[in-house]
Image (spheres, helix red, strand yellow):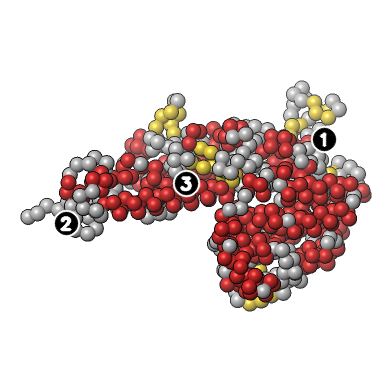
Amino acid sequence: MTGVGATYRKLIGKPEAERYTLRQTEDWATLNWRKLEANAGAPWARLQRRIYQAKRCGDMRRVHNLQRLLLRSFSARCLAVRRVTQDNRGKKTAGIDGVKDVSPPTRITYVYLLRHLRHAASPVRRVYIPKPNNANEMRPLGIPTMLDRAYQALVKLALEPEWEAVFEANSYGFRPGRSCHDAIEAIFNHICRQPKYVVDADIEKCFDRINHETLLAKISTIQPVMHLLRAWLKAGVIEAGRFFESEAGTPQGGVISPLLANIALHGLETYLKHLLPSTTVVRYADDFVILCTNEQTLIEAQTNTEQWLSQLGLRLKPSKTRCTHTLQDYNGEKAGFDFLGFTIRQYPVGKYQTYTYRGKPGYKTLIRPSLLGEQRHLEKLKTDIQAYTAKTQGWLLTTLNPQIGGWANYYRTSVAKRTFARVDKHLDHQLTLWAKKRHPQRSYTWCRRRYWCFEKGNSRFSDGRTRLRAHADTPIRRHIKVQGTRSPFDGDWLYWGTRLGKDPTKPDYFTTLLKEQQGRCKYCGALFTTEDIIEVHHKNGNRTDNYRRNLALLHGHCHDQQHAAFATKLVLVTTTTSLRSRVPGNRHARFWNSGGRGDSPSDCNPARPRGTRRDHGFLELFPHFGLLGKSCGLPATRPPPQHRVRR
C-alpha cells in the first residue's frame, strides 16, 4: 500500500489522495456490481460490442474513439481491478513489490489510478517452473506487479474485441469461447475425408523472442495504449536481485501476454493460404499443424513458414518439428502425430468395411489420448498414492478423485474407453500395493476386503462413504466445434450460453446446475460468460456432501465472499458462546456448555480450573459450522476435557 499511495500522491496531489483514502472502504463495499456487470447492458460490454462491430466494418476511426471511451469507463476500471485482485486464481503470486493480498481500500485506489494512462511500468520478477513434458527443462515466467496487472487487464478489455473481429478461424489458443477441443475437431474435419501430410511444428521460445518493433507496428492503435505497451515490453526483468534489460519477447505470466502473442502470430494462415491454397493451418498459441495434400506442398509450406516467422525474430524448434502422414509412415516417422495431448492417426481397414472419400476404401480416423499424457497421469497418481501411505483412506480418496475426474473429462471427447480401462487397471494395482504396505503382515485377500467393497457386482475402492471414481465411468461425448470466426463479442448470448453448458471439461452436474440456475450466479444473479471463473459451492460447508440440493454455481469472487461471510458468522457465534459461558449461573451457558442437554450444573461452575471449560456443545448441535470453520482455515474446537480421578 505504501508504493501505491506514493504513486497516487505524485499523480493527483496529497490532499485529493487523502480524500479518496477516507472513502475507499465504503466505496468498494457499496459498489453496485449488478449494474456494473449487467452483461450485455453493462457500459464496458456495450463498448466492446461496438468496437467489434466497427472493426468488422473497417471503421478504424470509430474503433479508436470507442477504445478511448472504454479506457475512461468507471465500470471497465472496476472490472479490471476485480479480475486481477479477486477473480485471478494466481493472485497470490507477488511481483517485485511483494503485494499479494489487496484489501478493498487498495482496490478502489487502483480504480482511481487507472484513470492516468501515463504509467511507468515496473520490471517483472523472473520465476522458473518445470515444463510438463520435460522436468529438466525450465520455463521462465515474468510476474508483473499488481498495479501493472490491473493496467494490463484494462488495456486487454480495449484491444481484445478489436482483434477478435479479424483473428483467423483456425486460431484457438488463449481466445474467449475457444478451447483445445475446438482445435482437435478442426483437424478431424480436415482429414476425415482425405489423408494428409502434416507439419507438426513448435516455435522455439515464442514468448521470449518476439520482435518488439514488429509487434508494435502490427498493433498500431491509440497513443495511450501504445505508450503502455512499449513500457511493458521494455520494462526489464529482475532475477536473483539483478536487473536485465528486455530486448525482445513478451514475459509469460502477464495478463496481456497471450493476446500479444496471438497478435504477433496472426496472419500465418492467410499467408500460407495465399501461396498454397490447398493447405490448412490449425494453431493453438505457439503450437500449430499444417495440413497438406501432397509431399511437394509439405516442403514448400515448411519453408514459407520459416521465412514468415523470421520477420518476427522467431524460428521453428527442430527437436519438436516433424513431417509425417496421417495414414502411412513417412521418412522413417510413424503415421499420425500428437497435438494438445491427443494422438491423431488414421488406420487402414478392410475393403468392404468403409468408403470414405469418393468411393475409395481404406481408413478410419481415430483420436485417442496420447501415450505420453497417459504415462504422466499414471506417474502423478502413483506419486500421490505413495505419499499418502500414513494417511487415512478418506484423505487419499479426496486427493485422487479430482485428478481422475479432470483427466477423464478432458479426454472424454476422444476414443478413450480402452485407455480409461487400462488406466483403471494400473491404478487398482497401485492401490493394492498401498494397502499391503499399510498392513505388511496381512494377506492381499484381507487387504482387498478391508479397503474394497462391492457395488453392483463390481469391486470399488471405498471407505463406506466415498468411493474412488473410475475413469471408465466417464461417458464419451463428442464435442461440437465453434462456428467459423464466431466470437463472444458478437452479442449472441443464446449461442454462447448454450456452448457454456456443453463444456466437455465440466462434470455432468455442472450442466444440470447451470440449467436450474438459468445461467446465473446464485450469489449475485449475473449471467455467466465464457470469461468467468465458475466454481461449485457447498451450501452447508461440507465438501463431501455432493448431493445436488447442496450445490450451487458461483463466480470465483462470489465464492470467496460467501466463505468470508460464513467465516465471520462462525467467529461471531463462537465469541458469543464464549462470553455466555463465563457468566456464573447463566442457564444459557449451562445449555451451551453441556452440549445442549442442560444437565450437570457443574458445567457452568465458576470454580472450574481455567482451560477446562466445555465449548464443544454448539458444534454437536450444528456440525456444519465445524466443517465450515475447517474449510475456512479456522482453528479446530478444543476437545472435551479429560476428567481426572482423585486418589
Q: Which residue is mark 1?
A: 194
Q: Is residue 91 left or right of residue 428?
A: right
Element class at badge 1: loop
Indicate left or right for 542 with 127 as reference: left
Task: Decide: few, some or many residues near mark 1? Use Cα within 10 Å; few <14, some 14-19, many ≥20.
Answer: some
Q: Specify the amino acid type for callout 1.
A: Gln
Mark sitting earlier along the chain (3/2): 3
Q: Residue 176, relative to residue 499: is it above or below?
A: below
**Number of the front mark, 3 or 2:** 2
Say which residue appears at 37% left-offset and 55% top-offset.
Answer: 635
Mark found first going from the N terminus, 1 or 2: 1
Label 3 sits on residue: 399
Question: Regarding mark 3 in the picture, which secondary structure is present there?
Answer: helix
Q: Which residue is mark 2?
A: 607
Few, some or many residues within 10 Å of mark 2 (<14, 14–19, 20+): few
Instruction: Identify the residue at image location x=51%, y=42%.
Output: 537
User: Do labels 3 and 2 touch, CB within 8 Å?
Assistant: no
Quadrant where the N terminus is found in the figure? bottom right
Label 1, label 2: how far apart the Cα atoms are: 89 Å
The front one of 39 and 358 is 39
Taking depth in this image into account, of 27 and 451 the one nearest to the observer is 27
Query: Residue drawn at (77%, 50%), measured in percent from left and top?
Result: 47
Q: From this view, report whether residue 477 is shown above or below residue 39.
A: above
Q: Residue 67: which disc?
A: none
Q: Is residue 465 above or below residue 533?
A: above
> Cα distance, mark 3 to mark 2?
46 Å
> Which of the marked residues, 1 or 3, is nearer the chain's N terminus?
1
Residue 132 lies in what quarter of the image?
bottom right
Q: Of the residues shown, which amino acid type is indicated by label 2?
A: Ala
x then y, percent, for residue 145: 63, 66
